[in-house]
Amino acid sequence: MNAAMDLDLALPECMEPLFQPARYKVFYGGRGGGKSWAFARVLLYLALQRKVRILCARELQVSIADSVHRLLCDQIAAMRLDGYFDITRTQITCAATGSEFLFRGLRHNVSEIKSLEGVDICWVEEAQKVSQESWDLLIPTIRAEGSEIWVSFNPGSPDDPTWTQFVEHPRPDSVVVKVGWQDNPYFPETLDLERRACRDTDPDRYNWIWEGEPRVISEAQVFCGKWVVEDFTPPAAARWFYGADWGFAVDPTTLVRCFVRDNVLYIADEAWAQGLELEDLDGLFALVPDSRKNLIRADNARPEIIRSLRRRGWMIRPCRKWPGSIEEGIAVMRGFSRIVVHPGCAHTAEEMRLYSYRTDPLTGEVLPQIIDKYNHCIDALRYALEPVIRGKAGKGMLHG
């Protein structure tokens, strides 16, 4: 009798896509979602159904204790499958089907990984730690017809290779699912107390640990300590600055409206959309108050868009760029005593949190290089503030 037929996997509904055919199955999110637990149960179920060769991989595996070996053993016991699996110190096999589980680290086992043959499913656990070099090694190795790569992780840095290539820009043959504590019907009260305490005391850390948002080290945040989200009413005499950034491919097109008062930068309105056609820009820009009545300074990389909008009655001018213009723009924005983001500008607030300098993956040291992402609203702000930035640069106020 096939033991798999009688198994109740007790999976949360969000894990059902594990049974869909796909080359990449990517499940990510915060703590308490039960991702690893569900992966282990489904893989054991598949190993009971048919002969499969399963590679359980991670970036570093000094010993078997670093792997998911213990987790699989615990689930075998929990599902009362001890009689179907043979467990050794380094391997798990199923005598009835011939299935086997292998455990490998990626970084220090290059030749061994390359020599692996016939892997049907590769489970990469704690995938946020996997380097681009390891992905480049692993992916071509999993080459059996119909083979799959399963990826589970809690997000790390927003420029981690795993986050960038599997979540930000997922491959077309992927299933990508965000799994949180809210999706786990077995989420224990003990963990919920920890979650709520973290939420109340450290919101940034909470978003990373419990809500599965990418982690930005505070020291690496470009605008750390400078910005807040607060409601405000613009003064009647505000001098408005408008700036636009054009989207390429999957990048969004943005328009922002801001003003400066008492050395505080106020960001009052934003328009944000992906995949727009040229004729849709009028509707997007109209979402920002009085945008047709005021000069918009825009990214000069798309002069054909600027010409088209001018023909349609928009007052729009290409911004100027010069060596160091990004750094000078950031210096001016950081030079304000505060940056206040209206609650209606959700994308701007997200970028304020995520826009960051690179960090050394080994040491955590903050490097003097800005990551070129999470910056579409911020770039629009720089363009909007061009006269302010050039004015301060001309007065030598940026570097002293």
Image: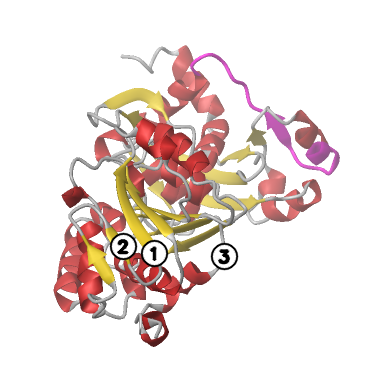
* Type of the residue with mark 1: Gly
Where residue 228 sits: x, y (%)? 33, 49
Q: What element carries label 1?
A: loop
Q: How crowded is mark 3: few (under 14 residues within 10 Å), some or many (20 or more)?
A: some
Q: Is residue 9 magenta?
A: no
Q: How crowded is mark 2: few (under 14 residues within 10 Å), some or many (20 or more)?
A: many
Residue at the image position 45 percent from the left and 65 percent from the top: 51
Query: Are the residues flagged by discs 1 and 3 in contact, CB closer than 8 Å?
Result: no
Q: What element carries label 2?
A: strand
The correct choice, above or below, for 270 with respect to 322 in the image is below
**Which residue is the site of mark 2?**
93
Residue at the image position 31 percent from the left and 62 percent from the top: 93
* Depth check, front residue: 248 or 351: 248
Residue at the image position 25 percent from the left and 66 percent from the top: 86
Q: Give the range drawn in magenta.
A: 308-324
Where residue 384 sits: x, y (%)? 56, 35
Q: Which residue lies furthest to the right in this view?
A: 311
Q: Which of marks 2 and 3 is nearer the N terminus?
A: 3
Left/right of residue 304 with respect to residue 356 in the rendered view? right
* Type of the residue with mark 3: Pro
Where residue 204 sits: x, y (%)? 27, 52
**Which residue is the site of mark 3?**
21
Query: Are the residues flagged by discs 2 and 3 in contact, CB closer than 8 Å?
Result: no
Where residue 7 sits: x, y (%)? 36, 83
**Which residue is the site of mark 1?**
98
Q: Which of marks 2 and 1 is nearer the N terminus?
A: 2
Query: Are the residues flagged by discs 2 and 1 in contact, CB closer than 8 Å?
Result: yes
Mark 2 and mark 3: Cα distance apart in space: 24 Å
